[in-house]
Amino acid sequence: MLTAIIGRPRVGKTTLARRLANDLKVPIVHTDDFIDRPWDLIPDALLRAVETHGGNCIIEGVATARLLGHFEFKPDVVYLVDNDWVELQPEHESLATMVFNKVKAWLETKPDCIIHFWEASHHVE
């Protein structure tokens, strides 16, 4: 089962990913680990990382929503993470808008996907 965790910066995506990975006994693929590569190489590198785990893993990171559009396969479960207590920096406002617009458009292509909304607590690891 492929799980994607999507949200704006510093909302608790990695915290949720760690909890789920521990409960489900699956690895995490962090999209942030690919940020140092040229953008056109990231989708292929991420796809290889997911395929390494047979598609049974959790994908999380700020770039997750953007990267999902590059795959022919779609996650079985998506967590949309938010926490209103995090003050959004001005440079992240357009990113947050872009992320959620992409997620909305992307989810229309996968109507059978299970979607969870998760609000992080005030404790972020």
Image (tube, rainbow, N blue to C red):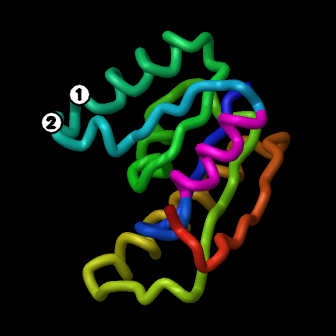
116 vs 70, nearest the viewer: 116
The tally of labels here is 2
The numbered mark at residue 77 is none
39 vs 111, nearest the viewer: 39
Residue drawn at point x = 22 percent, y = 33 percent: 40
The numbered mark at residue 41 is 1
Residue 108 placed where, x, y %? Answer: 71, 52
Residue 114's place in the image compared with 121, above or below, is above
Residue drawn at point x = 66 percent, y = 35 percent: 21
Residue 108's place in the image compared with 90, above or below, is above
42 vs 17, nearest the viewer: 17
Residue 51 placed where, x, y %? Answer: 52, 13
Residue 23 placed where, x, y %? Answer: 77, 36
Residue drawn at point x = 71 percent, y = 25 percent: 25
The answer to whether any part of residue 101 appears in the image is no
The residues bearing labels 2 and 1 have C-alpha atoms spaced at a distance of 6 Å
Q: Helix, strand or loop at disc 1?
A: helix
Question: Dominant secondary structure of the magenta stretch?
Answer: helix
Residues tagged 2 and 1 counted as in contact (Cβ below 8 A): yes
Q: Amino acid at mark 1?
A: Leu
Specify start and end residues of the magenta stretch as a single range.
13-23
The answer to whether any part of residue 83 appears in the image is yes
Task: Indicate whether residue 117 is drawn in magenta.
Answer: no
Query: Which of the 4 image quadrants contains residue 118?
Result: bottom right
Query: Which of the 4 image quadrants contains residue 44?
Result: top left
